[in-house]
Amino acid sequence: MKQWLSQMALVAVLAWSSAASGAEKVGVVLMHGKKGTAEHVQTLATDLIAADYLVLTPDMPWSQSRAYERTLEEAHTEIDAWIADLRAEGATRIVVAGHSMGANMAMGYAATHSGVDAVLALGPGQTADTPNFRNRVKDSVAMARAMVAAGRGDTAAAFEDLHLGRVSTVTATARVYASYFDPEGLAAMASVAPRVGVPVLWTVGTADKNLMDLGRAYAFDRLPANRHNTYAEVASDHMGTPDASRAVVLAWLRQVFGEPGQRS
């Protein structure tokens, strides 16, 4: 098992030891946001574990410690591995979930991979395809694209990063940077949404101005019709969305998968 799992081991052990003994087990890969850590989703993870879900909260390539270490597509291979771990422990249904950039990545993964049964998108971020986001990092995106086209995709450079409304500088290879910031890539949720063929819970903090301004029409309303698709506003700012969404998440998962011990 991968080295970066070590800090998540306690969560995994708790989840697996508390799982219901019935045939149907639901596993959840719950991902943090940009420059975040697993602690940012830990309260929700604890609630899910108590409700008999198998939960992993991995340290992803956009975390505080890894900071654009691998491309978006390579991050998908890490999600593959976490799902394999959950299945090895008995998970028969899989939820990919996340906060902010983690929600963005959950959407992109579900759009391009089979074997996913539901998505939790909690305060989705990295809205790379919106005009404001595009305008604020367009020079860096153009530079990264040019470097990749010139065969310098694995060369590191300083690029602009937009996080919580503030522009900062991040060092990454052009190939990695472009994968997360290209407005026509897999981080573009408006174009990814129509390809997500499983139920989606999309939650937005009422004090999260960016998402409130974008509204349902940005990506949620582009999802394929599904009776379980749910758009919910919770009383929170952007960073507090995972905690504020806890009751909504648990109720929605029961609706989609049934009560623990009664899943089929």
Image (spheres, rainbow, N blue to C red):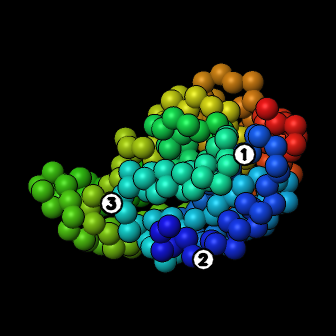
For the residues carrying marks 3 and 1, which lies nearer the camera in this image? Answer: 1
Q: Are marks 2 and 1 in contact (CB under 8 Å)?
A: no
The residue tagged 1 is 26
Q: At which x and y percent is residue 221?
A: 63, 29
Mark positioned earlier in the residue sequence (2 or 1)? 2
Question: Which residue is painted at 60% across and 24% down in the image?
Answer: 224
Per the model, the C-alpha gap separating discs 2 and 1 is 22 Å
Q: Residues within 10 Å of mark 1 (few under 14, many from 20)?
A: many
Question: Which residue is painted at 63% across and 63% down in the image?
Answer: 57
Q: At which x and y percent is residue 130?
A: 48, 45
* Viewer-side residue, 135 vs 187: 187
The residue tagged 2 is 7
Question: Which residue is painted at 32% across and 69% down in the image?
Answer: 172
Give the left or right position of residue 259, taking residue 105 as reference.
Answer: right
The residue tagged 3 is 176
Is 228 situated above or below 56? above
Per the model, the C-alpha gap separating discs 2 and 3 is 25 Å
Assign the C terminus to one quadrant of the image. Answer: top right
